[in-house]
Image (tube, grey):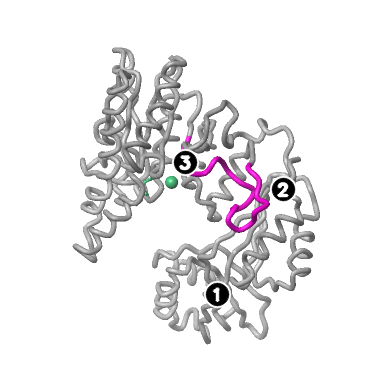
């Protein structure tokens, strides 16, 4: 029987009533002849509460116990979902990560999936079980300890199951009805996309469009899992939501698919560093050792053997970056000053069409200039252009770019 993976996020299982509503959708797919693997998140707010309890109990907590605690939210919803399905006469049972067993690395709180054996669940399907309800976000390490996959990790659990079971599709039920050209809270003209390419979704996900965990999109792209994002609060239809799929499956698309933003960005400038081989390696090794996620990097032209080096990182890592740089500022790097600007935001336009169309950068910069917005840092990739600007202009920039690229109109 064809396998379908259905994932329900925290808001979709927030109450017993909503679990019932989700279970009904599962029942519909079972009636259509699917064997269904349901992946559940914790009830909304639960994981935050559990994380809070860990921090209050032990500020420098043991990461293995953190995982033991925060993984428990999903166990509750998995059991409740199985019970709800049983009440509807749908043969179902729950599975915690270790029972599958979903094997992961031992990197607690950020573990990676290594293997999902399919035999246990397949054997139950063969015996007549119709739904396997699996607790998302969790797994088990080689040491036999419970692990978690990082916040938002249930998306990744869902895609990994879809890949392992060669599922027809992986439906991600959430509280929005799909992927939009930009955040509808920022631009009222934002339009829901019917389809989006994996690469575009990957850029949008990592740029702060929080619909899907970035790793889930990476995994879907690697294993060609057709991923559909849809709302659990709206009527179901076969073309509901947004399909995240291969580029070949998209017939027509705009050059720019979407505008993304991130408020959580800081611009760090090392003033007057020596310009010679090994300096960049030393700076960025020190930052990497300190666990700083560097995003954009710009090196200025040098004057008299000195140059300025600018990079961006998440705002909550500024203190760590400053400490790492202060410590590394011996005779090797030897910078004059480190200036942290935490009042910036990153705005990006993304689209696979940029590979074959010129003029996107020119249009973007002209648009920002028309609004009187100064660009502080620019970076580009094959399908993305990002700029750092003053945070107070972020909304304006997103709206203006959305208009300039006419994203309210379908291709
Ligand atoms: N409950 C976990 C979280 O909030 C995992 C998930 O829902 O994806 O991060
Ligand atoms: Mg999520």
Q: Which image quadrant for residue 84?
A: top left
Residue ID for mark 3: 174
Q: Is residue 97 above or below residue 325?
A: above
- Residue 244 visible at all: no
Alpha-carbon span between mark 1 and mark 2: 29 Å
Question: Alpha-carbon neighbours of circle 1 within 10 Å: few (<14), some, or many (≥20)?
Answer: some
Q: Position of residue 340 (x, y in %)?
A: 51, 78
* Magenta residues (range): 172-192
Q: Quadrant of the N terminus?
A: top left
Q: Is residue 56 above or below residue 151?
A: below
Local secondary structure at mark 2: loop
Question: Alpha-carbon neighbours of circle 2 within 10 Å: few (<14), some, or many (≥20)?
Answer: some
Local secondary structure at mark 3: strand
In the foreground, 253 or 232 = 232
Q: Residue at x 33, y 17 (%)?
A: 125
Point out the tag, 1 or 3, that comes first from the N-terminus.
3
Residue 408, labelled with which disc? 2
Local secondary structure at mark 1: strand
């Amino acid at each position: 029987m064809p396998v379908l993976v259905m994932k329900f996020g925290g808001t979709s299982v927030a109450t017993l009533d909503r679990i019932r509503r989700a279970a009904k959708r599962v029942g519909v797919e079972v009636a259509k002849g699917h064997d269904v693997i349901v992946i559940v998140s914790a009830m909304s707010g639960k994981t935050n509460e559990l994380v809070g309890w860990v921090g209050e109990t032990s500020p420098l907590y043991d990461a293995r116990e953190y995982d033991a605690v925060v993984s428990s939210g999903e166990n509750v919803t998995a059991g409740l979902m199985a019970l709800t399905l049983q009440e509807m006469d749908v043969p179902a049972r729950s599975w915690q990560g270790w029972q599958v067993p979903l094997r992961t690395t031992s990197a607690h709180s950020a573990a990676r999936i290594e293997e999902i054996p399919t035999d246990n669940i397949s054997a139950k399907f063969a015996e007549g079980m119709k739904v396997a309800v699996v607790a998302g976000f969790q797994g088990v390490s080689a040491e036999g300890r419970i692990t978690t996959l990082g916040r938002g990790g249930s998306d990744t659990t869902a895609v990994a199951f879809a890949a392992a079971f060669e599922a027809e599709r992986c439906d991600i039920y959430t509280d929005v009805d799909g992927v939009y050209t930009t955040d509808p809270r920022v631009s009222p003209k934002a339009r829901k996309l019917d389809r989006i390419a994996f690469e575009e979704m990957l850029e949008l996900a990592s740029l702060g469009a929080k619909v899907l965990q970035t790793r889930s999109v990476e995994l879907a792209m690697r294993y060609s899992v057709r991923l559909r994002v849809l709302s659990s609060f709206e009527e179901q239809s076969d073309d509901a939501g947004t399909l995240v799929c291969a580029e070949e499956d998209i017939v027509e698309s705009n050059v720019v698919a979407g505008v993304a933003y991130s408020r959580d960005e800081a611009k760090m400038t090392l003033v007057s560093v020596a310009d010679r081989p090994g300096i960049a390696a030393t700076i960025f090794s020190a930052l990497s050792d300190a666990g700083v996620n560097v995003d954009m990097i710009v090196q200025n032209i040098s004057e008299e053997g000195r140059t300025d080096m600018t990079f961006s990182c998440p705002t909550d890592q500024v203190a760590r970056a400053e400490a790492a740089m202060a410590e590394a500022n011996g005779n090797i790097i030897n910078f004059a000053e480190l200036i942290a600007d935490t009042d910036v935001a990153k705005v990006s336009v993304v689209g696979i069409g940029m590979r074959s169309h010129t003029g996107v950068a020119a249009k973007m910069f002209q648009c920002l200039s028309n609004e009187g917005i100064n660009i502080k840092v620019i970076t580009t990739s094959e399908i993305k252009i990002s700029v750092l600007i003053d945070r107070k202009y972020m909304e304006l920039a997103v709206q203006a770019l959305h208009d300039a690229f006419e994203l309210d109109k379908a291709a």
